Image (cartoon, grey):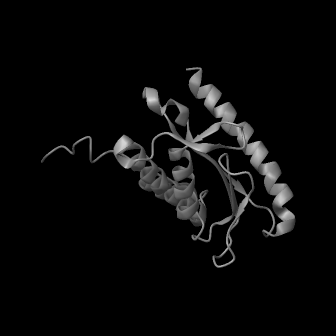
Amino acid sequence: MSTPSSISRRTTLTKYLIEQQREHQNLPADLRLLIEVIARACKQIGYQVSKGALGEALGTAGSENVQGEVQKKLDILSNEILLEANEWGGNLAAMASEEMEKIFPIPNRYPKGNYLLTFDPLDGSSNIDVNVSIGTIFSVLRCRTAWSRANRHSCSRARRRSRLVMRSMVRRLCSC
């Protein structure tokens, strides 16, 4: 009888999420699907970043984000990847990004969900040129009411709160 390799004992994100759903019944299926879609979008972002100069996405885009930081081409590309991956799934009411001035409501042609997604699509992008760690930071918040134009104010508050959460996460990671 052979011993399973360490590779076969690894727990993937999907396996972990399904086990949480089965064992604890504390993870709604729509939230699990949303997290998996975000993870796939992050893989696409990683692929784009790995192409480096060959992907023609390095350098500045000539614009600023909501924080007043110079946007990189990869910031904009990463933002588009996350928007396109998540807008059609039916799990979100709206999205907000550090790269966009306004909230991104889910287009009317797609079903609306019960969550708000806020994200920094490529945190640390200013460090790409010096080969320092970069990544995507996101927060999923439950949307308490059906999305409408009147809810933009509450989504803006959620976006600010999420930005604070993201900043504190970055500070904790950087202080290690």
> Which is more toward the observer, 118 or 126?
126
Q: Residue at x 75, y 61 (%)?
A: 143
Q: Residue furthest top?
A: 175
Q: Is residue 1 left or right of residue 167?
A: left
Could you tell me residue 159's position as x and y percent?
75, 49
Left or right relative to 158: residue 9: left
The x, y position of residue 84, in whole percent, is 55, 63
**Identity of the residue furthest to the left in this view:** 1
x and y, in percent, of residue 13 in the image: 44, 51
**What's the residue at 66%, 36% (across, down)?**
69
Q: Is residue 120 above or below residue 18?
A: above
Pick out the residue farthest to the bottom. 109
The reply, left or right, for residue 5 in relation to residue 126 is left
Check the picture and name the quadrant holding the C terminus.
Answer: top right
Residue pictured at 57% horizontal, 65% vertical: 29
Q: Is residue 167 visible?
A: yes
> Can see residue 124?
no
Q: Is residue 3 above or below residue 110?
A: above
